[in-house]
Image (cartoon, rainbow, N blue to C red):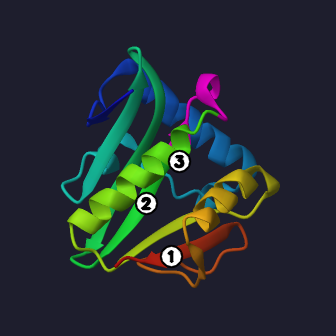
Amino acid sequence: MDIRIGELRNKAVITLLEEHHQDMLSHSPPESVHALDLGALEQRDVTFWSLWINQELAGIGALKELDKEHGEIKSMRTSKHHLRKGIARILLEHIIKQANERSYKKLSLETGTMEAFLPAQKLYQRFGFVECGPFGNYQEDPYSMFMSKNIV
């Protein structure tokens, strides 16, 4: 298992990002989909990781710096060939560790409210994330659930 920084221009990564975006659109209207596109994931305030098993892409995740004390988890996605193998947990642990190393005091995320998002919601809850109000540039939205966790 290998967690790599970047790899955004890798064909497998692009395919998984496109799959992620299309899946979000199948559960929420376009104005309620907050997945970052490739250009946004390449910005200086975003760090993107890809997790590989035997040279096969297993999952992706990113950390966006909102300010010097607050980070946002973005683009968490597991490849359909690696579902229920703990990939999301491994990526989430990695992102939380990175947030700690950056001395963030808070880590937040936005996920969907539809039934398809229940596994993600439960994963975040297991790691101590709790529902909160909108943060950053987000607005209240019936398709969005906002969660945060204080980092110590």
Residue, disc 1: 148
Would you place residue 146 above or below residue 31 in this image?
Answer: below
Q: Which of marks 3 and 1 is nearer the N terminus?
A: 3
Query: Is the Cβ of the residue at disc 3 closer than 8 Å to that at disc 2?
Result: no
Residue farthest along the right direction in this orientation: 115
Q: Give the range drawn in magenta.
A: 77-84
Name the residue nearer the viewer: 94 or 134.
94
* Quadrant of the drawing holding the C terminus: bottom left
Which numbered disc, 3 or 2, marks the residue closer to the eye?
Answer: 3
Name the residue nearer the viewer: 150 or 60.
150
Would you place residue 92 above or below residue 15 in this image?
Answer: below
Residue at (67, 35) in percent of width and height: 84
User: Which circle marks residue 84 in the picture?
Assistant: none
Residue, disc 2: 73
Residue at (26, 79) in percent of width and height: 69
Whether the magenta-drawn stretch holds residue 82 is answered as yes
- Mark 1: amino acid: Ser
Would you place residue 14 above or below residue 124 in this image?
Answer: above
Residue, disc 3: 89
